[in-house]
């Protein structure tokens, strides 16, 4: 009989690494730190947690680079301690950004921001294994945060390269239109609209994160979690045209992993021309959500059995390493304006086998 302490130490991951094998990742809701919900998610399958979310801002009184926002760090340490007691390998990242959040202040370059972040991180009761970029747009359609400046794009790349050098994780969480295999179109704006598809919607990207992946040294980003549930995403367009969800997921994954090119004509960027975008299956995560309330019909929703079919029918080289979902607090809630409840952690685990399911759990007697 192994002692609890030994089990816990066996489960410890080297800091800055991902669990082996398939991944079920999940974001926490803004600032959330609920021990009950988080432990349940981890037991049911989640092995990567994105805590949510900090910003990189210049303090207006001191003019110094400062980390703002995020969950209560004492609470995160307590919950992480409880996860370690369970002996279930889990990586923990802190997300930078979120919808309506400021983009990093480019008065400081990426290497400087990494040093600031790393000092902040090392002062935490339990440091994070790295960070997850979720820089997005802003409800105010003319906000400056609906544009990625060339400096901001470079900052994301440089800070991520510095994290890798330090042995930490860096991941990307693009809304699907920011990383869109269906088009070569590229620009740095996050307030585009499409005259052919919900022209009233003004918050589409055009492959800005595809540029980040293409412009960074190979291997900089450990995972790319593509948010299929972005409002009026390319996925929703295909589903609305009648494509079944499992078929969509299978064809989209295959196309994305085959790679595509983006047409960069921006004179302010170092890369120009038709730039190839290539993501390995081991770094590819499809991100799902519950289409709650009024987002039904505006946010692509996939039933877990559709996800399972798409995964199991695909050659391993043509499917994602795993899935992510937004968010832990919503797991088990009613979906897509129906009375049916979906448990993503449990359902994904039933075929990805990240955690032992109850029947095979050697610790349940
Ligand atoms: C944590 O989540 C549980 C289960 O959803 C809920 O009952 C509880 O009220 C939450 N705790 C806090 C402090 O929000
Ligand atoms: C999109 O955002 C940019 C950057 O803030 C702004 O200059 C531009 O006017 C916005 N476009 C629209 C259509 O509002
Ligand atoms: C790239 O975009 C430019 C400007 O819109 C266009 O002139 C050019 O033909 C495009 N290149 C390709 C290969 O589509
Ligand atoms: C989700 O709800 C929308 C709007 O009611 C519907 O058109 C769509 O078919 C539903 N999606 C699934 C996968 O059931």
Image (cartoon, helix red, strand yellow):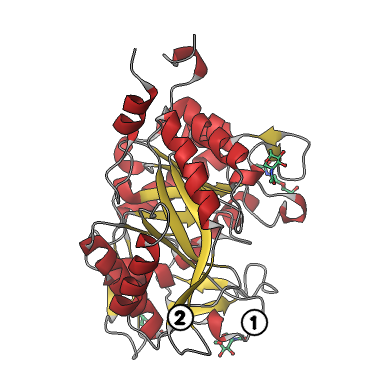
Q: Earlier in the sequence, mark 2 or mark 1?
A: 1
Secondary structure category for the residue under label 1: loop
Quadrant containing the N terminus is top left
For disc 1, the marked residue is: 141
Residue at image point 40% right, 89% down: 107
Per the model, the C-alpha gap separating discs 2 and 1 is 14 Å
Foreground: 141 or 16? 16
Is residue 125 in view? Answer: yes
Residue at image point 22% right, 67% down: 217
Discs 2, 1 touching: Cβ within 8 Å: no
Q: Position of residue 365 (x, y in %)?
A: 49, 8
Q: Position of residue 250 (x, y in %)?
A: 44, 42
Task: Decide: few, some or many residues near mark 2? Use Cα within 10 Å; few <14, some 14-19, many ≥20.
Answer: many
Secondary structure category for the residue under label 2: loop
Foreground: 287 or 46? 46
In the image, which disc is placed on residue 10? none
Residue at image point 41% right, 68% down: 209
Query: Image check: 19 left or right of 180?
Result: left
Foreground: 179 or 80? 80
Q: In which quadrant of the rendered view does residue 119 lie?
A: bottom left
Q: Position of residue 282 (x, y in %)?
A: 30, 45
Residue at image point 30% right, 30% down: 10
Q: Does the residue tagged 1 have its C-beta within 8 Å of any atom of ligand 2?
A: yes
Q: Position of residue 24 (x, y in %)?
A: 45, 40
Quarter of the displayed picture in which ligand 2 can be seen = bottom right
Q: In which quadrant of the rendered view does residue 89 lie?
A: top left
As drawn, 221 above or below 61: above
Task: Decide: few, some or many residues near mark 1? Use Cα within 10 Å; few <14, some 14-19, many ≥20.
Answer: some
Is residue 303 in view? Answer: no
Foreground: 188 or 235? 188
For disc 2, the marked residue is: 148
Query: Image check: 197 left or right of 351?
Result: right
């Amino acid at each position: 009989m192994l002692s609890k302490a030994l089990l816990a130490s066996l489960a410890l991951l080297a800091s800055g690494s991902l669990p082996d094998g398939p991944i079920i990742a999940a974001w926490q809701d803004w600032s959330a730190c609920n021990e009950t919900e988080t432990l349940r998610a981890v037991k049911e399958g989640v092995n990567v947690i994105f805590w949510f979310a900090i910003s990189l801002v210049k303090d207006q009184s001191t003019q110094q680079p400062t980390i703002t926002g995020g969950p209560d760090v004492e609470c995160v340490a307590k919950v992480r301690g409880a996860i370690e007691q369970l002996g279930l390998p889990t990586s923990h990242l802190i997300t930078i950004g979120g919808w309506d959040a400021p983009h990093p202040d480019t008065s400081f370059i990426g290497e400087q921001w990494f040093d600031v972040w790393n000092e902040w991180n090392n002062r935490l009761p339990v440091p994070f294994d790295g960070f997850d970029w979720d820089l997005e747009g802003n409800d105010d359609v003319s906000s400056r945060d609906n544009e990625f400046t060339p400096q901001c794009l470079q900052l994301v790349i440089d800070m991520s390269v510095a994290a890798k050098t330090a042995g930490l994780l860096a991941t990307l969480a693009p809304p699907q239109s920011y990383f869109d295999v269906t088009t070569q179109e590229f620009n740095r704006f996050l307030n585009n609209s499409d005259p052919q598809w919900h022209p009233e919607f003004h918050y589409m990207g055009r492959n800005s994160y595809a540029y980040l992946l293409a412009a960074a040294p190979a291997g900089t980003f450990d995972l790319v979690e593509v948010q299929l549930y972005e409002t009026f995403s390319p996925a929703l367009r295909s589903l609305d045209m009648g494509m079944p969800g499992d078929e969509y997921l299978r064809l989209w994954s295959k196309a994305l992993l085959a790679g595509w090119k983006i047409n960069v004509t921006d004179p302010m960027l170092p890369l120009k021309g038709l730039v190839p975008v290539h993501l390995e299956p081991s770094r590819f995560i499809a991100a799902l959500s519950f289409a709650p309330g009024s987002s039904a019909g505006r946010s692509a929703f996939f039933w877990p059995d559709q996800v399972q079919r798409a995964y199991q029918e695909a050659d391993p080289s043509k499917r994602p390493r795993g899935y992510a979902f937004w968010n832990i607090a919503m797991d088990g809630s009613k979906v897509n304006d129906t009375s049916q409840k979906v448990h993503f952690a449990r359902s994904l685990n039933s075929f990805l086998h990240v955690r032992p399911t109850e029947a095979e759990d050697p610790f349940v007697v």
